Each structure stands twice: as C-alpha cells, then as structure tokens.
Image (cartoon, helix red, strand yellow):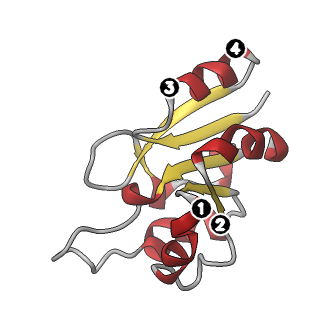
C-alpha cells in the first residue's frame, strides 16, 4: 500500500482508482488554497511514496513571486519524496524554465501519462 499526496485539481477518477487498488491519498496545499497540509512542510515521517501536482498549483501568481516552485518543493527534495508535475507535452520545456533546483528532480508528465507514472513509482 502506498500513500499518494495530491494537490487540488488532481483527477478524481485517478485518485479513486488508486484507492480501489488499496492505496491511500492525502490532500496537500500550496500555502494559499487551504486544500491540505502545506507541501513545503512535508517530511519523511509523513510516509509519502509520491506527490502529484498540476503545474499551476506550484506557480505563484503575479505579485507573489517571492515563493517559487523550488521553495514549495524544497521539503520534497530534502526528504527524497518523488514529485510528479502534470503539464501537457508541448509545455514541458516552458515548465522547466520556471524551476531551478527542482528542474532535474521532478517528473513532468502529460495527463495521459499520469496513472502509468504513478504506478511505476509506487
């Protein structure tokens, strides 16, 4: 059994499928959406096997750029928790440009690839 952390907007059919297969899911937040535990505060003791987020949940809006994607994912990198960021294929390079330290750490996957990538990791 795996524990999958997810940001708001993650496909509910995918989450239901993962639960039906015996996995647990836990909501995470970006610090402004109030969705769940703040992603920057996760630790290894939380037991996450993987975290799923759509790109827009990690990008700060104009005027709030003081919190970067790298800031939000620092704890994941620190505790070696795999992160999948969902973004259409044609925008993967642009997504990488929005990151520095996280660029080589995260897996960028298209929505069509998401379930297979999650299953590969867990």
- Lower position in the chain sequence, tag 1 or tag 2: 1
Q: Nearer the viewer, residue 55 or 77?
A: 55
Q: Mark 2 or mark 4: name the one nearer the start of the chain.
A: 4
Q: On the image, numbered disc 4 is attached to which residue?
A: 20
- Residues 32 and 109: in front is 109
- Residue under the point 61% across and 78% down: 103
Q: Residue furthest left?
A: 63
Q: Secondary structure at mark 1?
A: helix
Sequence-wise first label, 3 or 4: 3
Which residue lies at the image location 36% right of the left edge and 67% below the top edge?
59
Residue pointed to by mark 2? 106
66 or 116: nearer the eye?
A: 116
Tell me if residue 31 comes above or below residue 19 in the rendering: below
In-image side of 103 versus 56 (left or right): right
Identify the residue under disc 1: 89
For the residues labelled 4 and 1, the Cα–Cα distance comes to 28 Å
Q: Nearer the viewer, mark 3 or mark 1?
A: 1
């Amino acid at each position: 059994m795996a524990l999958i952390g997810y940001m708001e907007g993650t496909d509910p059919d995918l989450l239901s499928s993962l639960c039906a297969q015996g996995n647990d899911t836990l909501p995470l937040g970006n610090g402004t959406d109030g969705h769940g535990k703040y992603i920057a505060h996760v630790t290894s003791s939380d037991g996450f096997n993987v975290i799923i987020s759509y790109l827009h949940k990690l990008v700060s809006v104009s005027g709030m750029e003081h919190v970067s994607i790298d800031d939000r994912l620092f704890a994941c990198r620190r505790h070696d928790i795999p992160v999948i960021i969902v973004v259409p294929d044609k925008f993967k390079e642009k997504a990488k440009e929005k990151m520095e330290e996280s660029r080589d750490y995260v897996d960028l996957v298209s929505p069509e690839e998401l379930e297979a990538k999650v299953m590969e990791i867990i």
